[in-house]
């Protein structure tokens, strides 16, 4: 094995320029894979972590996944007469028998539950109207299903219970309207009900869509504003095991018929974007590694053609086809391993560079820099792919070299 490695190393150094280009190709592929993977996965994991932290894991809504079947179609499914344009019966919004559902869920282990009423309203302050999603909550139960209490940057969640007309607003709403803790603001619902309320807290989640558009009041107050006495339209659930969210959602929907969404389903459009991002990343980096693989293939093929007589001599002194194949495979692996090691270094330096960049943006989430995933798995995957590509690129010319007949080579040379 030592002799085979020495021969392979000599072949690698026999064409230094081509070897350097191939090593650089592998290095660029591995380095950019590590850097981009840390950037993409860091952003995705940070977003998922924020969603899981601030939101309930399962939400029961006062709607149904499918429209109800019309009575005529239900009674006569095989009828030859079809009635179109039948208007569905108007149904009062809200979860029916919410108390019974809450009681049944309270008996389930591993979950915290909270009834809520979500409605639309305007905050009127300083001559400016700002539309908000107004969430009526019971503070004692809300602290168990969301991170509202932890996200408060001014005020306490208990103030919502102690102040009859208290309201908690997002940091984005506060900045747009000029509201501060202690401000009095008019809250106007879509039903024309107006209440004077006092800002008792300001929260910041880091997710712009929530910070700029959501406010919290006591459940009873929102029922007054929305003219829906003793009505809730959401039941929010937090699980001790978030991996059971999909299973729990399906079970609850099958039992109570109301549309029930897990946190994954509620954010499936975002996860779809993540799939596209990952596809672009892997395609781009994969193309770099494939190009480097062609470089390795070119080196090994050229060496095979140039060293035909060497191969013939090696076979004539007792080297087997396996030995010859191993020599040229080692040549490709040497290039791949060196390129991988340099690529790991490049990837580490890229991560350090990205981590040093500071900025303040407000897009899907609010952040002051790149969120990076420094997992060793990215290095392992990049290295594994690079070495596999190197071995595959070297295998075909190695097999060709092993199949050479030394007699034909010597006769042809003579």
Image (spheres, grey):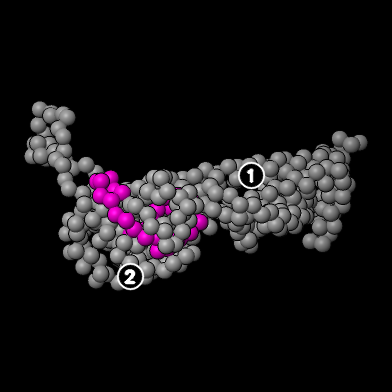
Which residues are the magenta region? 188-217
Q: Mark 1 points at which residue?
A: 286
Label 2: few (<14), some or many (≥20) within 10 Å?
few
Question: Is residue 316 visible to us here?
Answer: no
The percent position of residue 32, horizontal first and vertical second, equals 68, 49
Nearer the observer, 176 or 384: 176
The percent position of residue 380, horizontal first and vertical second, equals 64, 59
Label 2 or label 1, whichever lies nearer to me, is: 2
Name the secondary structure under disc 1. Answer: helix
Q: Residue at x 15, y 42 (%)?
A: 90
Q: Decide: is 200 above or below 209.
A: below
Q: Residue furthest right?
A: 414
Nearer the observer, 132 or 265: 132
Q: Residue at x 44, y 62 (%)?
A: 181
Q: Which mark is residue 162?
A: 2
Nearer the observer, 148 or 255: 148
The percent position of residue 5, horizontal first and vertical second, equals 81, 57
The percent position of residue 170, horizontal first and vertical second, equals 44, 56
Residue 244: quadrant of the picture = bottom left
């Amino acid at each position: 094995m030592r002799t085979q490695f020495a021969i392979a190393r000599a072949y690698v150094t026999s064409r230094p320029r081509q070897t350097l280009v191939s090593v650089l190709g592998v290095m660029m592929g591995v380095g950019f894979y590590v850097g981009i993977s840390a950037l993409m996965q860091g952003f995705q994991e940070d977003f998922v972590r924020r969603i899981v932290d601030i939101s309930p894991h399962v939400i029961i809504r006062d709607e149904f996944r499918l429209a109800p079947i019309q009575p005529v179609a239900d009674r006569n499914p095989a009828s030859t007469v079809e009635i179109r344009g039948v208007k569905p019966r108007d149904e009062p919004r809200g979860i029916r028998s919410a108390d019974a559902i809450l009681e049944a869920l309270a008996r389930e282990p591993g979950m915290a539950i909270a009834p809520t009423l979500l409605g639309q309203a305007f905050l009127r302050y300083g001559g400016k109207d700002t539309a908000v999603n107004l969430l009526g909550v019971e503070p004692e139960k809300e602290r168990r299903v969301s991170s509202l209490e932890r996200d408060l940057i001014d005020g306490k969640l208990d103030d919502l219970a102690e102040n009859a007309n208290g309201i908690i607003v997002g940091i984005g709403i506060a900045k747009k309207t000029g509201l501060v803790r202690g401000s009095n603001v008019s809250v106007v619902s879509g039903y024309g009900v107006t209440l004077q309320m006092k800002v008792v807290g300001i929260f910041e989640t880091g997710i712009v869509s929530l910070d700029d558009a959501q406010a919290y009041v006591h459940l009873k107050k929102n029922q007054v504003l929305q003219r829906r006495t003793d009505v809730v339209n959401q039941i929010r659930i937090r699980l001790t095991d978030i991996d059971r969210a999909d299973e729990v959602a399906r079970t609850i929907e099958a039992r109570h018929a109301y549309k029930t969404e897990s946190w994954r389903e509620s954010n499936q459009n975002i996860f779809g974007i993540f799939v596209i991002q990952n596809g672009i990343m892997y395609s781009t980096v994969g193309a770099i590694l494939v190009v480097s693989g062609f470089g390795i293939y070119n080196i090994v093929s050229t060496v095979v053609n140039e060293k035909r007589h060497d191969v013939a001599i090696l076979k004539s002194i007792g080297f087997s086809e396996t030995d010859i194949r191993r020599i040229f495979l080692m040549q490709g692996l040497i290039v791949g391993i060196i390129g991988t090691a340099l690529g790991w270094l490049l990837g580490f330096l890229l991560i350090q560079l990205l981590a040093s960049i500071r900025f303040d943006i407000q897009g899907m989430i609010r952040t002051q820099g790149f969120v990076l995933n420094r997992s060793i798995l990215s290095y392992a995957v990049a290295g594994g792919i690079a070495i596999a590509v190197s071995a595959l690129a070297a295998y075909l010319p190695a097999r060709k070299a092993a199949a050479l007949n030394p007699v034909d080579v010597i006769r042809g040379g003579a």
